Image (cartoon, helix red, strand yellow):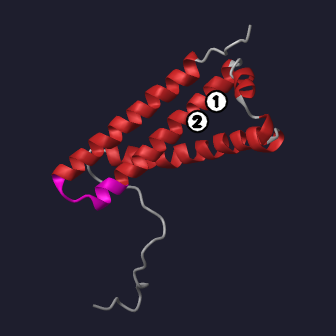
Amino acid sequence: MSSSPTEPPHRASPYRRPPSGGDGFELYAWFFMRVSGVFLLFLVFGHVLIVHVINDITAVNYLFVAQRWESPFWRTYDWLMLILALAHGANGLRIVIDDYVHRPAWRIVSLAALVSFSAIFLIVGSLVILTFQPVTSG
């Protein structure tokens, strides 16, 4: 099975190509991974810059977070980072499960566990960020 002299030999692409066919979910999931990855780069870079570079790590404590979360901007920033990181990671694990868990029953159990843990972490993280009230000593 050799290729014709005019055709280049087939090489596997180092990039994952967008899925074709199907119901469109995989295409949207593929696109989401790219878009969320770019947004996460900026969000995480900003987080590391502010928390670990501009401020000394010893200054990052309860008071630092309480003062930062007085601003709706920083709560929204951290909440968006939480949502995107959880969704991006869960989607990546979903792909790993689809690739490596071959028995249908185990795939269902694995996906159910993934969705359950993702939902729990999203709910708990959202509750912390959105309902945080600083404790004042007095």
Left-right relation of 66 to 24: right
Amino acid on which the number 1 mark rests in the picture: Tyr
Q: Foreground residue, 9 or 105?
A: 105
Magenta-tinted stretch:
96-104
Q: Quadrant of the N terminus?
A: bottom left
Rendered image: mark on residue 77: 1
Q: Nearer the viewer, residue 135 or 18?
A: 135
> Is residue 113 depicted above or below 68 in this figure?
below
- Secondary structure of the magenta portion, mostly? helix
Q: Residues within 10 Å of mark 1 (few under 14, many from 20)?
A: some
Labelled pair 2, 1 in contact (Cβ < 8 Å): yes
Residue drawn at 50 percent across, 21 percent down? 127
Q: Residue 12: horizontal and vertical position, in percent? A: 42, 75
Instruction: Return the mark for residue 120.
Output: none
Q: Which residue is mark 2?
A: 81
At label 2, counting other C-alpha atoms closer than 10 Å, the crowd grade (few under 14, some 14-19, many 20 or more) is many
Position above or below: 2 against 122: below
Where residue 59 sits in the image (x, y, percent)?
80, 34
Q: What residue is drawn where x is 63% and y is 24%?
A: 75
